Amino acid sequence: MKGLVIVIGRDLRLALRQSADAWLAVLFFVLTATLFPFGVGPEAATLRQIAPGVIWVVALLAVLLSLERLFLADFEDGSLEQLLLSPLPLEVAVLGKVAAHWLTTGLPLIAAAPLLALLFHMEPAGLLTLLLAMLLGTPVLSLIGAVGAALTLGARRGGVLIPLLVLPLYIPPLIFGVGATESALSGLSARPDLLLLGALLLVMLLVAPLAAAAALRQALE
Amino acid sequence: MHRFANPARFTRIADRVLPFVAVATAAALGVGFYMALFVAPPDYQQGESVRIMYVHVPSAWMAMFIYVAIAVASAVALIWRHPLADLAAKASSPIGAGFAFLTLVTGSLWGRPMWGTWWEWDGRLTSMLILFFLYLGHMALMHAFDDQQRGYRAAAILALVGVINIPIIKFSVDWWATLHQPASVFRLDGPTIHPSMLWPLLITAVGFKLYYVTVVLLRIKSELIAARLRALDLARLKAS
Amino acid sequence: MTLFEGRNLDCRRGGRDVFAGLSFELPAGGALLLTGANGSGKSSLLRMLAGLLRPAGGAILWDGQPVGEDPGAHAARLHYLGHLDAVKPVLSVRENLRFWASLREGAEGQGAEGDGATAEDAGGGEAVPDDSVLGESGRLEAALDHFALGDLADVAGRLLSAGQRRRLALARLLAQPAALWLLDEPSVGLDHASVGRLAAAIAGHRARGGSVIVATHTALDLPDALPLSLDALAPPPLPEMIW
């Protein structure tokens, strides 16, 4: 537990001192979303209808954008092999790094989501559900993304490869995340979708650190 | 050194087995397609276009079967570091992608008369499209490293993660599809499918399986020969 | 008495046999000096001994036990210094060092078993419990001072020269005790005085019963180190690859 906190603290400190990286994801999130009114027209009804989908897809792309730097710097400067050789199990170290990634990427996206909801004329009724769904869904994005980032370390086209590996696996959280928000907007219960998102989070909490740690070990061989 | 003894034994066995599997493939596919095209009855609603099913459905089965086969091979490769398992995974991936693609194309053709469009976001077709993407990712990762061993191991981990995710993806896509549109048209009507349709379907399915075995054996064999050539090159480089 | 042992190790990298049939024995307090031409596999051997690389054949034993059985315990008992310094540019020298030290201290539960296996390892914190709290930061400052980094302690990693970064990486060895040091070209980029400090650190480590394996091209004062040349262990140019 203590090791986990140490890793999170270190990665948070690193992220805060290079805060431009964290801002980049949020900026991308807002900027990309503002392209849609130009694409589909500014009619409030249209925007309201596509709001949950746009917010989720853009959030997913913003997370994707931030994945490459998750392990790359540590891989290149030798920190990763030291981390592997520390007494801390590598799975725990991965979990710590993913937690720090979520705190510096997922959480700011959630904070910026109400702004997008406003720009897209989303009904206030859906906002709380949207935020709740993002709270459950964005950690899933970080966890799955960690596997993709770990697998592509040292690859010839690592940055281009990550989306190819990760995006298909992002479809379930996207479906449940949008589903929850749309249910809430149409007056239905968002509970089933939120429960499914929660279940997905639990599964990925178990699977992703194992898979990412295995990928990191073989990347360092 | 078992890692060198095994390929030799594999090649010997493969050489002996290959002619039989190849002939069996041709026979099963010949009989299966003949029955599908000339013996099986046309559908009272869909007419002759129902015959696409005899390619579409076995292809879909194969696309899913091969991904599971890759996952099994990957587990063997990761746990026991068996080099033939790596080669089997590498050889299977493009075949699986081919079957997934065939499923998508035949699905589009089959659906055209009914939907009036070349593509519908039907649950099953959409799942197959995602499976096709998973295959592409697997193939890309396999070839993304200068060190082939690295590619094998990364792709193996990806295949295992993928196989855990496939049921989740399938479930979520079904969940999504039922919200947005009625149930799929690609459906065999329950367990009471008429034997005149079932037999051609099963025979082509067996033919596809045999085809997979034939091509995988051939591809593993050629990989082994390529590896041997590389080893000879390296040895010559060192000797000079 | 042999503490750390390699038996018949084979190394295979990128489809090529690097060395085969390598064996060595290292007692507590002993030193092993790896020599060999470029590409003879010195770095690969050290990575293998650290547990980063799986040997293609043979066994690595600590106290008679295969290290692969408990990689966590093995990691806890060793310090590995590779070509890379693992220095974060935005963290200060002290922050860099403290992170790695605290990671070992924080996971002492897992490491205790490995440390306990070596009775000679007098540096193990758990032997003297009252020393552990005060000792950690004291040891960290002592490690910085030993490699003459005391004045640079608050300087950001990105401002360090290559030699200073190397010294910071070396300070990790002293910031937390470990029974086995695996050093890959530790003196690269070091000035004359720093090489002397490195030799002193190794001597102190060995005096406390610690063992060390060093691969180096430059002269490094290692009294009665056992030499191990990898040149003789290169496999024949035409191995039995041709089936």
Image (cartoon, helix red, strand yellow):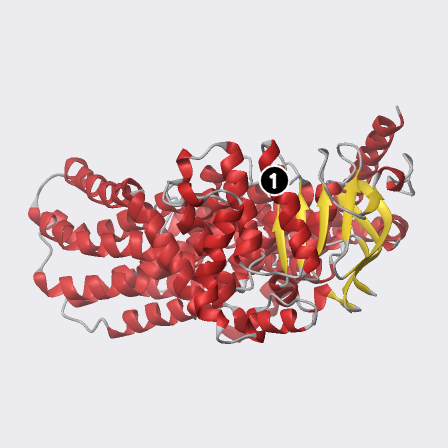
Residues C163 and C68: in front is C163
Asked if residue B32 can be seen in this view, the reply is no
Residues A13 and B51: in front is A13
Asked if residue C77 can be seen in this view, the reply is yes
Say which quadrant the N terminus of chain A sits in. Answer: bottom left
Q: How many numbered marks are there?
A: 1
User: Under tag 1, what secondary structure?
Assistant: loop
* Farthest-out residue, top: B240
Q: On the image, which quarter does residue C74 sit in?
A: bottom right
Q: In this view, does C45 lie to the left or right of A193?
A: right
Residues B182 and A49: in front is A49
Q: In this view, does A139 lie to the left or right of A128?
A: right
- Residue at the image position 62 percent from the left and 49 percent from the top: C201
Residues B205 and A136: in front is A136
Q: Position of residue B136 (x, y in %)?
A: 53, 44
Residue type pointed to by label 1? His
Q: Position of residue C194 (x, y in %)?
A: 58, 38
Q: Mark 1 = which residue? A: C83
